[in-house]
């Protein structure tokens, strides 16, 4: 993964949210703050969540914008928010790791496959949830080739 797409500054540790909307906004705000997307991308992430939950199982959610949000994306980027106590995504689904994605020109498909590989191992999710530093999380993703 190139540093430009995912850096330690894109990771928030020990976050706590009372609603999934707050959690998604926080995940999206990183993408906005780091210049990957326009601010309206966050609304598109929430819109997307209304259409279909981005909960993937294993305590992981991957919020991202709707199809028409592509024009709000300036460059491909990834954000990660660790929520050790979890946030309820509805239907009894508790999310402890949110991975926000902004994809440009299909670049995000490669990102998605790396996320899928990392998140398919429950022990990796546990490592992300228990990580004390952004570097620990980053190295998990960098180990995937």
Image (cartoon, helix red, strand yellow):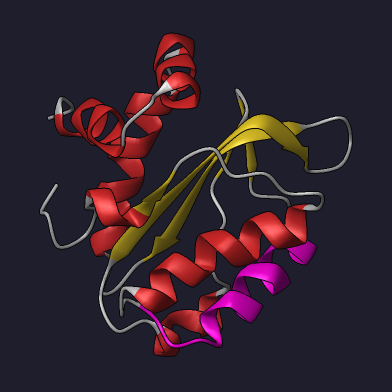
Number of numbered tags placed on the structure image: 0
Task: Residue 48 in the image: state x and y as whole percent.
Answer: 67, 67
Relative to 107, 57 lies left or right: right
Image quarter hosting the C terminus: top left
Residue 134 falls in which quadrant of the image? top left
Task: Residue 7 in the image: state x and y as whole percent.
Answer: 22, 52
Is residue 94 shown in magenta?
A: no
Most common SS among magenta residues: helix
For image coordinates 32% across by 76% down, the residue present is 36
Relative to 52, 145 lies left or right: left
Q: Which residues are magenta?
A: 37-51
Which one is nearer the viewer's eye here, 108 or 6? 6
For image coordinates 58% across by 62% down, the residue present is 26
Q: Where is 18 relative to 45, above or below?
A: above
Residue 140 falls in which quadrant of the image? top left
For image coordinates 63% across by 28% down, the residue present is 59
For image coordinates 36% across by 46% down, the residue present is 112
Q: Is residue 52 visible?
A: no
Task: Residue 13 in the image: state x and y as whole percent.
Answer: 46, 40
Task: Residue 143 in the image: state x and y as whole percent.
Answer: 15, 25
Residue 58 falls in which quadrant of the image? top right
Q: Where is 111 relative to 136, above or below?
A: below
Q: Is residue 120 visible?
A: yes
Is residue 42 shown in magenta?
A: yes
In the image as oriented, which residue stretches furthest toward the top? 123
Q: Where is 1 relative to 70, above or below?
A: above
């Amino acid at each position: 993964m190139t540093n430009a797409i995912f850096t330690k500054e894109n990771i928030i540790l020990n976050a706590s949210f009372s609603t999934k909307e707050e959690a998604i906004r926080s995940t999206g705000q990183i993408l906005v703050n780091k210049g990957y997307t326009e601010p309206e991308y966050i609304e598109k992430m929430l819109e997307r969540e209304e259409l279909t939950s981005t909960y993937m199982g294993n305590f992981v959610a991957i919020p991202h914008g709707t199809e028409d949000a592509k024009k709000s994306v300036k460059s491909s980027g990834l954000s990660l928010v660790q929520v050790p106590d979890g946030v309820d995504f509805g239907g009894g689904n508790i999310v402890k790791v949110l991975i926000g994605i902004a994809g440009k020109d299909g670049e995000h498909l490669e990102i998605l496959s790396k996320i899928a590989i990392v998140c398919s191992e429950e022990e990796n999710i546990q490592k992300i949830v228990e990580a004390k530093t952004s570097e620990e999380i980053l190295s998990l993703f960098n180990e995937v080739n």
